[in-house]
Amino acid sequence: MGNQAQVRKGRTAVSASTRNFPNRLGIDTRVSLSSAKLATVCALMGKIPGVAEYVEQV
């Protein structure tokens, strides 16, 4: 996501950004910071994977 992009209110997002603070990516949004590799796997799977799922994808 670009610096100005936001997700819908109350959603969950994965970000490879180096910064996070309340409402940066959207109002009432839950954000998980990750590596670029994990963010890619999340985007491909449409969810945050467990360890076994991540290893299988990588």
Image (tube, grey):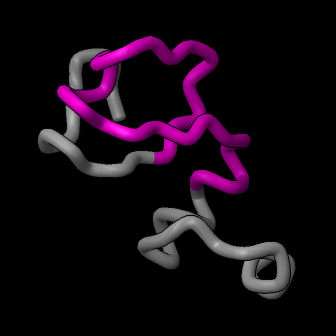
Farthest residue toward the left?
8
Q: Whole-percent x and y of residue 12?
A: 36, 50
Residue 26, image x, y percentages: 22, 28
- Which x, y percent locates residue 37? 72, 53
Classified by dominant secondary structure, the portion drawn in magenta counts as loop
Is 15 a magenta residue?
Answer: yes
Q: Residue at x 40, y 46 (%)?
A: 13
Location of the N terminus by quadrant is: top left
On the rendered image, what quadrant is the C terminus found in? bottom right
Q: In the image, 17: left or right of 35?
A: left
Q: Residue at x 56, y 13 (%)?
A: 19
37 to the left or right of 39: right
In this picture, residue 22 sits left or right of residue 19: left
Instruction: Note whether 39 is above or below 54 in the view shown.
Output: above
Q: In this picture, is 48 found above or below 38?
A: below
Residue 15, relative to residue 43: is it above or below? above
Question: Residue 5 location in percent, x, y?
Answer: 22, 27
Task: Answer above or below: position of 17 versus 45.
Answer: above
Q: Is residue 46 magenta?
A: no
Identify the image quadrant of residue 18.
top right
Question: Dividing the picture into quarters, in which one does residue 10 lie?
Answer: top left
Q: How many marks?
A: 0
**Residue stretch in magenta:** 14-39
Residue at (62%, 67%) from the top-left corner?
41
